[in-house]
Amino acid sequence: MIQKLELHNFRNYKKAEIEFSTGINIIWGENGQGKTNILEAIHVLSFTKSMRTNRNKDLIKINEDFAVVKGDNLEIQISGISNQVMIKDGVKYETAREWLGLLPVVFFGPLELNIVRGEPLLRRRFMDMAICQYNPRYIRALSVYKRAKEQKTKILRDFPEKPSLLDVINEFNEKMIQSGEFIIQERKMFIESLKEKSNIYHSGISGNRELLNIEYSPKTNLRAEMEYKRESEIQKGVCLVGPHRDDFNISLSGLNSRIFASQGQLRTAALSLKLAERDILKEKLENTPIMLLDDVLSELDEKRREYILSHQDTGQTLITDCEPSRLKALSIGKTLYVGDGKIG
C-alpha cells in the first residue's frame, strides 16, 4: 500500500504529491493529462521499470536530466544516462533482484489483452513478473538460467569456427537443467492456482456464460529432452529445450481464446487473470498487492463494472477513468482529478 506518492520531473509532472486512501482511488480527467503516468510511477516503484517503455529517458520530463518517484519509504531515482538508484529507508539497494517484492503490484491496462491473444513471450513474462514478487529463489533461478542460455547460444553460434567449444556445452546444459526445472515447477504451481481462481472471476464477470480454462504442459525432463534434441540444436544454432520456450493455453468454453475470442471476451479473460494474480500474491505475501486498473471501466457495461468494483475490497486499488458521469454513478472511493499536469 502507498499512502503518499511524490513525483519530481516524472513524465508530465514537474512536482506532485498525491495522498491515497487505503481502499479504492479513482483518478479521473480528460485523455492525455497524466492519469496513466501516476499508475506508471507506482509500477516503476514496484518493478524498477515501466510497463510502457524500456528507456529511462522516456520517464523524465522534457528538458530535465533526472526524475524521482517516491512512495512512503521507497524511492527510485531515474537518470537518462545511468541505472536507477533504489533506496528504502535511506538504504541503497544494488540490484533489482533485491528490490522486487517490496511493493507488490498488479497492473491491468489495454495491452494486457495480449496475455491472452499475444505471443508466448508475453505469457511467460506474466508468469515471471508475478512469481518474482513473492519468490526470491525464482528470481535467482531466472538469472542463472538466462546467463547459461546466453553462453550456450554463443557456443552453438560460434562452434563452426571453433569446434572445441562443444566440449564445454554440457557445463551450461547442467546449469540450464538445474535452474530450468525449478522454474518449471514454480510455474506449474502458479498456474494451478491461477486456473482455479481465474475461472471463478471469469464466471462472475461473464454472468456464468463461459468457462475459462488454462493448461500448462511443459517438458519436465530437461536432461532427456536436451539429449534428444542435441543434434537439432547444433544444426540450427539455437537452444530448443527449456522454460524459455514455455507457453500456456487459454480456452473459453473449450475454444482457443487466441483464435475464437471476441474483444469483450479477451478483456474479460485478461482481467480475470489479473484478479487471480492479485489473490495469489495476497496469499503468498504479508502485503496485499496494489491493484492498478488503467481505463478498465470504460469498456465494461454497468453490471460488469459493479462486479469488478465489488471485488476490490481486499486492498488498495487505483483506477483511471475519463468520464465524470460514470464516477457519480459509482459513488465509491476517493476521487482525484488530473488536469494539465496537476492533481486536485
Image (tube, helix red, strand yellow):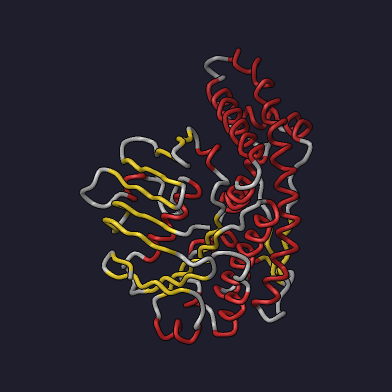
Q: Among all residues in the image, which is located at the extreme left?
A: 63
Q: Residue at x 44, y 50 (%)?
A: 44
Relative to 21, 35 lies left or right: left
Judging depth in this view, the residue of 92 and 115 nearest the camera is 92
Compared to residue 289, the image places residue 234 above or below, namely above
The picture places residue 83, in percent across and down from the top left corner, at: 39, 36
Of residue 275 and residue 52, the one placed in the foreground of this image is 275
Q: Is residue 340 visible?
A: yes
Report the side of 1 relative to 198 (left or right).
left
Classify 327 as above or below 41: below
Q: Is residue 259 visible?
A: no
Name the residue rendered at 55%, 19% in the picture: 160
Above or below, comparing residue 142 to residue 191 in the picture: above
User: At which x and y percent is residue 199?
Assistant: 72, 68
Of residue 168 and residue 47, the one placed in the foreground of this image is 47
User: How many numbered marks does the figure carry?
Assistant: 0
Residue drawn at point x = 35 percent, y = 35 percent:
82
Q: Quadrant of residue 237?
A: top right
Residue at x 40%, y 39% (from the top left corner): 84
Q: Residue 98, how many percent across, how many down? A: 55, 37
Q: Position of residue 156 (x, y in %)?
A: 58, 25
Q: Residue furthest top?
A: 164
> In the image, is residue 199 above or below residue 231?
below
